[in-house]
Amino acid sequence: MMVSFTVALFAQSARPTAMTAQQAKNFMITKPLSQPKAVTPLMPTVTPARGTNGMISSPLYIGSTFQEQQTNYNQHNKIAVFPDGTYSVVWMTAPRNGSADRGTGYNYFNGTSWLYPHDHIQRIENERTGWPCIAPLGNNGEIVVAHNGSTGLVVSYRPQKGTGDWTYTTLQGPNVLDANGENPSTALLWPDLATTGNIIHVIAVTESDDGYYYNGINRCLLYYRGTYDETSNTITWESPRVVFNATAEEQDWFVQDHYNIAANGNTVAIFYCYGYHDVRIWKSTDNGVNFSTITLFDNPVKDDNDMFDVYDPSIVPDTTTINYIPKDISTVTVGDDGKVHVAFDLYRMKWAGWDESSSTPGDTVMYHSYWPTWNYQLVYWNEDMPVFVGRQALDVDTLAAHGYTTFDMVDLDGDDTVRFLLRDYWTNNIQGSIVSYPQISVNGNNVYMVYTTMLDYPFVASNTLSGSNIIQLRGIFGVRSTDGGHTWDNGTSWLSYGKDVYYIDNWSDYTESFDPDVLEFAADYDAIFPAMGKKATNGKLMIDWMTDPFPDIASGFNSQAFVTSKIITADSLGIYNNTNEIHQGLWIDPTGIADNTLQGMKLYPNPATDNLSVAISSNEHANADLTIVNLMGQVMYSDNVALNEGNNLLNVNISNLTPGVYMINIRTNKGTSTQKLIVK
């Protein structure tokens, strides 16, 4: 019902602010896809069944919020997966202009349908909270942890998932004082949560205000282990432990939401990933009793002074050396074998010079600039792989040479190039880079990963609430590995794709009017903050994300965003809704693609000058449209041709085409095929 409602609104929406194709190009960066990458073998020769076997449910809005920003950085555990094929989902919800009423939005899938309607804005707790996370509890229950920003974490739990009253308790942090020994605080902030049966694992940081130190660390990351007693419906918490047993000399502070926790069986893993700290895993194999540390990346750039081994303000800065460090966003999952899997986005930076704003030599530091056009990608790692060593270890070419696969923007129009807007036109307050917000699920040797990335031109931009700017849109994509994450299938699923959504292909049509008092859907929408259940159940994956019709989340509580859910067959990830099918035009409805009646298109000569021969095979007699378009999507040649069943040879006069790169497409009612043509 919500999907049809959305389509109707799209159909009635006007277009955003006018911009010509040439003007759009002025705001855009063109980047060839990174080559070479690690080995990415083609899909297995046995083609999986298409159609409804690929997707269990259509995209469905299961909740809404005017609190568009769902995290500072990492997306924590938002989906509880139960063995019987049911799921619970949480998000941060609030009504319009309703910061005081912010809390945990919740919905439950009983295996057939969702408990609440798509547009509900209601919260679990009876006080203001934020940053919720959820996990199974005990035999059949569930637990939600969020912070209230003052006294500690609000813990809500119940013995039966999806029904019954919640029990509310507060988990207070250690009592810390400010620099004057006053103003005690027991705040715990920005939590994450995992469970193994009746054992609860929670991480959160202490008071964030400057001057509050625990273990000598301002904003200290703590681990709490709790035990749930189902008979009495109570939780007993152990004393907190500092994650990594960090000391003040090792860790001056932890960055909010730069950590994740996962648990499976007796294995618990906490992953901390931040550009100016070492990248580390704190791992327990006895269900949180004892931990050891894995240093995944000994970061050579721990602060602005670490360009050099010895700090010396008299040194002339090296403004040419490139450094590769993790950026902002990461995730962690534990497989059934106890092995840890992580993914994080990359950051390419170089030093720009000394900061001359300070007259005190001891305060003089270097500053750096970032380079959004270079190597903004995701990298995946698991415990079968070596750790990253050296300043250049995270360079994409170095990673590829050592067998790592990195994940770039997805080529949506099939021209081997991706295009994205300049940094000023990215959605505000997302924090992640061009490719970011990974989520991993592991089942045996199958590793599934979803993430969000900028959409390749022409699937690119939307208006903001101001009605004057264009904004780079994001989509949700998914990939699969069948050999434990060592190589990845060649397909990429565009999970947030909607065939009825207006994607910009003619910038001269891009105009808009907006009434801020009326909820309107923009022509396009932003798909951000993906979450995925840590395990597949009954062969299915639960995925959700935030659909934002007006993707400028800096606008606060002025526009409504929707929690969009999708349940897919796990092994269809990377196959179902394949991006190759999108740019070939094969994706025809929300339940699958038709059997393509056209195959084997070949062009010769290619490059060509005046005359072109097109060989193509058809499974039927049919009339077909033959079109040639340039890279701006403009039709430069069109003709209607008759195809015979079997092999066909068509002759096309291209003498009127100027030298350049084109795409030639042949389409019937039951098939389509596209190839690249070079005219010289």
Image (tube, helix red, strand yellow):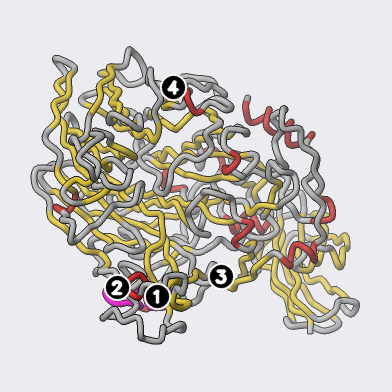
Question: Does residue 618 sit above or below 315 in this rendering?
Answer: above
In space, the residues marked 4 and 2 are separated at their CA atoms by: 44 Å
Q: Check contact, mark 1 vs mark 2: CB within 8 A.
A: yes
**Disc number at residue 123?**
4
Identity of the residue drawn at 52% across and 72% down: 374
What's the residue type where badge 3 is placed?
Answer: Thr
Q: Distance between the residues labelled 1 and 3?
A: 15 Å
Q: Quadrant of the C terminus?
A: bottom right
Q: What residue type is labelled 4?
A: Arg
Task: Judge whether residue 392 is colored magenta.
Answer: yes
Q: Name the residue under label 2.
A: 300
What separation in Å lies between label 2 and label 3 (alpha carbons)? 23 Å
Tell me what residue is drawn at x 60 percent, y 71 percent: 31
Examine the structure image and report whether residue 153 is included in the region drawn in magenta.
no
The part of the image, by quadrant, that contains residue 232 is top left
Q: Is residue 634 visible?
A: yes
Secondary structure, mark 1, is strand
Q: Mark 3 points at which residue?
A: 373
Any mark on residue 323, and which? 1
* Earlier sequence position, callout 1 versus callout 2: 2
Instruction: Answer with mark 1 or mark 3, whichever residue precedes in sequence.
Output: 1
> Would you call the spot at circle 2 few (<14 residues within 10 Å), some (14-19), or many (20 or more)?
many
